[in-house]
Image: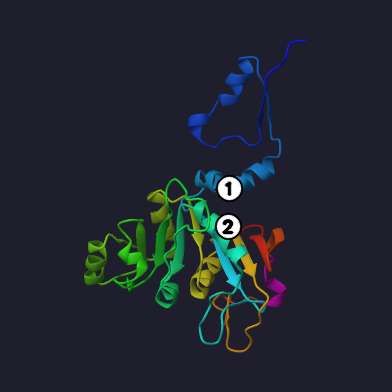
Amino acid sequence: AARVARVVIPARDPNPAAAGGAERLRKAGIEVDTGVEEGTARELNAPFFHSFASKRPWITLKLAVSLDAALADATGRSRWITGSESRRLVHEMRAGSDAIGVGIGTVLSDDPSLTVRDAPAPRVAPARVVFDRAARLPSGSVLARTARDVPTIVIADSPPASRVTALGALGVRVVQATSLRAALESLRDAGVSSLLVEGGARLAGAFIGTGMVDRLVIFQGSAIFGAGALGAFAFVPPTEVERAPAWRVLERREIGTDTMTVYAPPSGD
């Protein structure tokens, strides 16, 4: 018996340029199955599907917390809350994102490079985004000094002209935005379809409080920091117990000595 060619399409491509592909295959005598493992396919390619339905990037908020859900101990120190296996996985997440975002507080305390190191380098390095109302990013910071090598963007409200000029001279792009949504739409216009937000607490509170987190990924270590530690959700707007929305667990697994949990926002967000 003659073999019949078959194509399996888990989810239809939302790109108008791809419209009609399945029909053309069928007309050519090829069997086409659609909707096979559609939910899994959409989750694996969530930023792509999201880009055709929203003006902002797909937002993944990643938090590394202690057993008592703190981002830093009472002295402000946060290295290292989780183990090397978790950090390696975070670098894989970076590699799969268009941009990595942090608040200026994280930059001032840690001076991070926000690059992919413990994972295969992506074809295009993710941009670094600093949410920094007054454009305080130090000229001597790693991010500013390497801005000509890796795109670096500062999101500011009403920054002093002198800071815009100084950062611009280093290759840092300053984007002025009066709201978080406006900032994210500017990033989307610049080609950022997926943004991995890595903290800190104020930035996490802003994203959760405005309902602009598509996936929340928590890496939880086993240490307890105790009194005075900075809670990961200290700046999330308060909610009464009866009205607190429940985030949905999509995945939970052990990563070395840590636990990684992936949450989706409450239905309707």
Q: Residue furthest top?
A: 1
Residue at the location (43% across, 76% down)? 105
Q: Which residues are magenta?
A: 240-246
Q: Residues within 10 Å of mark 1 (few under 14, many from 20)?
A: some
Q: CA distance from mark 2 to mark 1?
A: 9 Å
Q: Amino acid at mark 2?
A: Asp
One can see residue 74 in this view: yes
Q: Is residue 81 magenta?
A: no
Residue 240, label in figure: none
Residue at the location (61% across, 14% down)? 28
**How far across and how far down the image is residue 75, in percent?**
51, 87
Q: How many marks?
A: 2
Q: Seen in the image, is 160 located left or right of residue 43?
A: left
In the picture of the structure, the residue carrying the numbered disc 2 is: 214
Query: Who is closer to the viewer here, 110 or 46?
Result: 110
Q: Is residue 242 magenta?
A: yes
- Mark 2 and mark 1 in contact? Answer it, CB < 8 Å: yes
Q: Seen in the image, is 180 located left or right of residue 162?
A: right
In the picture of the structure, the residue carrying the numbered disc 1 is: 46
Q: Residues within 10 Å of mark 2 (few under 14, many from 20)?
A: many
Query: Who is closer to the viewer here, 40 or 113?
Result: 113
Give the image quarter of residue 236.
bottom right
Q: Secondary structure at mark 1?
A: helix
Q: Seen in the image, is 160 located left or right of residue 56?
A: left
Q: Mark 2 or mark 1: name the one nearer the start of the chain.
A: 1
**How far across and how far down the image is residue 68, in percent?**
66, 79
Instruction: Give the vertical position of 63 relative to 268 (above or below).
Output: below
